[in-house]
Amino acid sequence: MDVDNYIIEMRNITKEFPGIKANDDITLQLKKGEILALLGENGAGKSTLMSVLFGLYQPDSGSIYKNGIEVKIKDPNDATALGIGMVHQHFKLVECFTVLDNIILGDEDTKVGFILKKDARSKVEDLMNRYGLHVDLDAKVEDITVGMQQRTEILKMLFRDNEILIFDEPTAVLTPQEIDELMKVMKNLAAEGKSILFITHKLNEIMAVSDRITVLRKGKLVGTVNKNETTIEDLSTMMVGRPVQLQVVKDEAKPKDTILEVKHLTVKNKDRRHTKALVKDVNIYVRSGEIVCIAGIDGNGQSEFVKALTGIAPQTSGEIIYKGEDVSHKSIRYRNTNRFSHIPEDRHKYGLILDFRLDYNEVLQNYFEDEFVKYGFMKFKAIRDYADTLIAKYDVRSGQGAATIARSMSGGNQQKAIVAREMERKHELLIAVQPTRGLDVGAIEFIHSEMVKKRDQGDAILLVSLELDEVMNLSDRIYVMYEGEIVAEVDPKKITVQELGLYMSGAKRDIRGANDEKSGS
C-alpha cells in the first residue's frame, strides 16, 4: 500500500451505539489535494465516521493515519492541531455571540488579556473577499439566516488555516447560487493543496466537484469509485441498493376551493433601528388539490413570511384567511387543531424537542387528543404504536426505535421524523419549508410521491424550497419572492430555470397577477 499518497487514512473503523453499528469495519483514504465525496443514505454512518476523524467520537476499533503515521485523535483540539477542520451538519455556533466572535472563538489572539479583534476582523474580511463568503460580522447569529450561519461555519474553519477540510452536508441550506459559489470555493481550496472530505446526498454536486466517491450503506463500505468512471444512476443504486426514480411523476393538478388566502401581509423588522419591512404587502392564495411553491434566494423574506403564517411570529399588518376565517391572531395550537401542518425550516429550533424520545416527538401537536389520552393520562402504548407506524412508513432509522432520543439521530432521520409527523397528521393545509433538506435520493423520491398523493387527495400544499429542481418538478404554480415582495407568479411548465433565476435575483419582475387578491377559484 502506497501510504505516501494519502494524507488521511481511516483503517477498519468500527463504531457502535446502543442498538446500532454506525460504522462497520470501514476503510477510507483521502489523497493530498483531492476532493473525496462521502455518499450514503440517511443514517448510513457518514457523519459518525467524520466525527471519529474530528475527535468527537472514539472508535471501538480501527486506526487513523496522517501522512502514513498513526495518530490518536482524542478530541477536536487534537484534530485541529493535526490541521483537520470540520463544518458540521448541525452548526456549532453560540447564538447570542456575533458572527465575528463565533469565527474566532477558541482561536483568539490576545494581548495583556484583551482580544485583538482588529487583526482577526481583517483576516476574516480577507477570507470573505477571497472566497465570496460575505456575512455581517457584527450581526448576532440568532438574527441571521440559516444560509448565513452556514457561511459562518465555513469561515470559522478557514480562519484556522486547516489543511484537511470536512464539509458535512454543507449545501443543505444554501441557495443554488450559493452552492455554485461553494463549489468554486472547494475547487480553489483543493487547487491550493487542501484535502477535502465532502459529505452530501446531492448527486449532481458530487459529479460537479469530486475526484473520487466513497459510498456507505447501512454502516458498511460499498466501494470507492472515480468520478469519471461512474454515473448518477450508478451512484444512486450503490447508495440505496435499488434503482431510483429521479424525476417526480404526477398528473395535472385539479385545484378546487381556496384553502389559504393571504392579503396584504407585511412583517416589519423587530429591530427598530431597521425600518425596512422584511415582508411587504404579500398577496397569495393556495387551493385544495395543488402544490404552490414560494421560490427565492435565502434571506428574501420567506422565513419571516412562514413564521407569520404559522403563528411563530406576528405579522405587522394584513390578513391570513384559512378556510374563510381570519386566523391572523389565532394561536399555534388553534391552527394545528384546525388541520394546519407545518414542516419547519429549522428542525432543531421549531421541529423537535431534542431530548425527548422519538415517539413523544411524533405526537407533539396531538398528544392531547382522545387517541392518545384518557382521563388525563397518556396512553403510552397507543403513542408508541402510532410512532412505530410512522417510523416504518418513512424509514426513520434509529438505534432504539421509538425509544430513541431525538438528539442522537442523524440529521436526515430527524428530518424524516418531522416530515412523517406533519404529513400523516390530519390536515387540509401543509406548509412545507425545505422538506427534503439533507435527505438522500431514496427518501426524496418517497416524500415527493407522498406529497403528490396528498395533493391528489385534496390537500392544499404551500412549498417553500431553495432547490430549483424540487421547485420545477413538484410545483403546480410558483410565486417568486425577492426582498420580501412577490415579484412574479409563474407556471413551471412555461418557464425555464434560467428565467426563474432572473426573477429570484431581482433582475426581472412580472407582478401581473402576483399581487392579485382574487383567489383564482
Image (spheres, grey):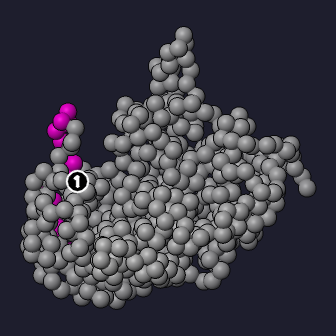
Q: Quadrant of residue 400?
A: bottom right
User: Residue 399: in sight, yes or no?
Assistant: yes
Q: Residue at x 17, y 46 (%)?
A: 268
Query: Which residue type carries mark 1?
Result: Ala
Task: Using the image as rendered, state which of residue 353 and residue 448 is in the foreground.
Answer: 353
Task: Using the image as rendered, state which of residue 321 and residue 61 is in the foreground.
Answer: 61
Q: Is residue 45 magenta?
A: no
Quadrant where the image shows the C terminus: bottom left
Q: Residues within 10 Å of mark 1 (few under 14, many from 20)?
A: some
Report whether 106 appears left or right of 217: left
Report whether 65 appears left or right of 395: right
Q: Is residue 277 magenta?
A: yes
Q: Residue at x 36, y 78 (%)?
A: 372
For this orientation, the residue located farthest to the front is 375
Q: Residue at x 62, y 57 (%)?
A: 47
Question: What is the x, y in percent for residue 476?
Answer: 29, 78
Question: What is the x, y in percent for residue 394?
Answer: 49, 78
User: Residue 129: in sight, yes or no?
Assistant: no
Quadrant where the image shows the N terminus: bottom right
Q: Give the magenta-colored segment's residue range.
A: 272-286
Q: Decide whether the magenta segment is chiefly helix, strand or loop.
A: strand
Question: What is the x, y in percent for residue 411?
Answer: 52, 61
- Relative to 406, residue 137 above or below: above
Question: What is the x, y in percent for residue 208?
Answer: 58, 60
Task: Using the image as rendered, state which of residue 489 and residue 48 is in the foreground.
Answer: 48
For this orientation, the residue located farthest to the top is 112
Name the element at disc 1.
Answer: loop
For this orientation, the residue located farthest to the right is 1
Q: Where does label 1 land, which residue?
A: 313
